[in-house]
Amino acid sequence: MRPKCLSPEPELGSIGASDGLASLRDPWVVHALDEVDSTSTFASKLPAWNAVRSNTQTAGRGRTGRQWVSDRGGLWISAVLPCELREPFWQFLPLAVGWSLASALSDLGVRHLRVRWPNDLMVGRKKLGGILAERFHTHTAVVGIGMNVFNTPEHGHSELTGATARLVELLPRKLSLDELVPIVLAAFRRAHGTLRDHGFMTIASDLNERWTEPRLVELTLAGQERTVTGRFAGISQTGALRLLTQPSVIRTFAATQVALLRELDQTSHD
Ligand code: BTN
């Protein structure tokens, strides 16, 4: 599937928030804040190729309306990307941005990174970051990334104990939040460009190849108590999860149908 994208990137030499790590053709205008309710809400009022970063968020949100803990020391950033309303372009953005960011971080030496459907950046079983794509206007989407870097989100949130990873412990050399911003923005841009020029299939194939273990997952369906357990059988060309629920039965689930994905221990079910 080749999604359609309306606006091309700005011309060479236009507005730019360039620094040492960004190229001269960097199209981004970056708004740096100390505190905001949500960088994505702030970004919703801005045009394409604007990005908002904040040291902390008082009402950071995750997928399905969950609270996103946004303490100081983490990277909380949202970017406005051009996209066409009629096409499902924006629905692919969480996986596409996860894919490009995982690749950028791997290049920096972070090991054991993987993208977990539909929007998580994982290191082993721990969540390093999450990605949220929202559409507030016809021709743009806002994509927000929350990544734990120096922060300790489990402080005051004991339910997160043992569940989160921090980038500072994974990078071979320390990078400041300021140095990480252009890397993340370049990943947004690469995801957007790949979707626009090549469609989602290249990204899906790559993600499928890299999704090794764990393959056994339990889904809690949106608006239901019900769970479905099955083996990961790939991400479809529409970005849906394919799950082997019984021998030779594959069911597909769109991200909007799934409230929660839990990874199960392979051994306890084999
Ligand atoms: C998830 O895993 O559920 C997605 C989390 C996305 C959090 C980021 S932090 C920056 C941006 N602003 C928000 O309010 N949410 C996203």
Image (cartoon, grey):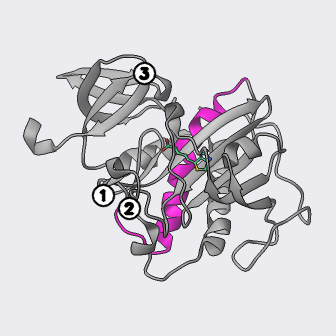
**Residue 259 horizontal/vertical position (percent):** 42, 28
| Mark 2 lies on residue | 165
Q: Earlier in the sequence, mark 2 or mark 1?
A: 1
Q: Earlier in the sequence, mark 3 or mark 2?
A: 2
Provide the residue span drawn in magenta: 86-112
Q: Residue furthest front?
A: 156
* Amino acid at the residue labelled 1: Gly
150 part of magenta stretch: no
**Residue 168 horizontal/vertical position (percent):** 45, 73
The C terminus, quarter of image: top left
**Residue 177 horizontal/vertical position (percent):** 60, 71
For the residues carrying marks 1 and 3, which lies nearer the camera in this image?
3
Helix, strand, or loop for circle 2? Answer: loop
Q: CA distance from mark 3 to mark 2?
A: 26 Å
Quick check: 20 above or below 24?
below
As rendered, which of 144 and 153 lies closer to the eye? 153
* Amino acid at the residue labelled 3: Ala
